[in-house]
Image (cartoon, grey):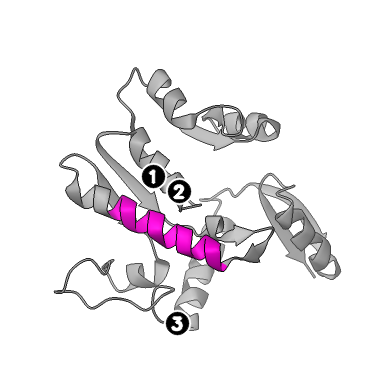
Amino acid sequence: MYGTCSARDRAAVEALGATAIDYRNEDFVARVRELTGGTGVDVVLDGLGGKLSLRSFRALGRGGRLVVFGHSDTLRNGHKSWRGWAEWYGSTAAVALWGLLSPTKRVSAYRIQKLREGRQLLPLSPRHEALAVGGGPRDPQQFREDFAVLLGLLRQGKIHPVVAERLALDDARHAHELLERSASKGKLVLVP
């Protein structure tokens, strides 16, 4: 297992059992090829999307799958950027097309609201109705149910999230500042 990170986060990634690749100072595609003897990886989980997805696709080996689940590349200085969205959608469309044309690699988009419906559709053909931008309607009750399940798994000790820091609810502003600076290595938990 490999994880891309900044040099500052290398120890945290390695503590989770992954080989760390410094995305700021290394070409992660070349490094993955080197580490895998040229074969590439089986799965890439891409939480940023955009242009990174194009490079992530190139890191896949035969039979590999790219799962795009994030939009972080649409932000500029912590704010929504229309140019970022346009670039993200252009790159995502390109990588989706690569996935359709490749006989040995696949691309999937992960959207939790579509997973609940038992299928994930992309607006790729006239046979399927295109989804609204943003992935369609969101059902707050579904998220409450999923959150309750996650809390149950946490109480049972079946999941172990990495908690960077616990902050008082009054420190929510400081927590957002930490998130904007990517200063935490794990989840920030606000407690009453």
Q: Which mark is residue 54?
A: 1
Residue 133 visible in the current orientation:
yes
| In the rendered image, the vertical position of residue 143 relative to residue 38, given as above or below | below
From the image, tell me which residue sits under label 3. 139
Residue 51, numbered label: 2
Q: Give the Cα separation between the discs numbered 2 and 1.
A: 5 Å
Q: Which residue is drawn at 47% across and 70% down?
A: 146
The residue lying toward the viewer, choosing from 23 and 144, is: 23
Residue occupying image coordinates x 45% and y 80%: 138
Q: Could you tell me if the residues under marks 3 and 1 are in contact, i.e. CB atoms within 8 Å?
A: no
Q: Residue furthest right?
A: 170
Q: Label 3 vs label 2: CA separation?
A: 30 Å
Hey, which quadrant is residue 110 in on the image?
A: bottom left
Say which residue appears at 35% left-offset and 41% top-offset.
57
- 92 or 128, which is in the foreground? 92
Q: Looking at the picture, which amino acid does disc 2 mark?
A: Lys
Q: Would you say the residues marked 3 and 2 are in contact, meaning their CB atoms lie under 8 Å apart?
A: no
Circle 2 sits in a helix, a strand or a loop, which is it? helix
Q: Within 10 Å of the Cα at label 3, are there few (<14), some (14-19), or many (20+) other Cα atoms?
A: few
Name the amino acid type tagged 3: Asp
| Number of residue marks | 3
Label 1 near label 2: C-beta < 8 Å?
Answer: yes
**Element at label 1:** helix
Please state the horizontal and vertical placement of residue 16, each as a whole percent of the image: 57, 34
Q: In this view, does 95 lie above or below 81?
A: above
- Percent coordinates x, y for residue 189 in the rendering: 72, 59
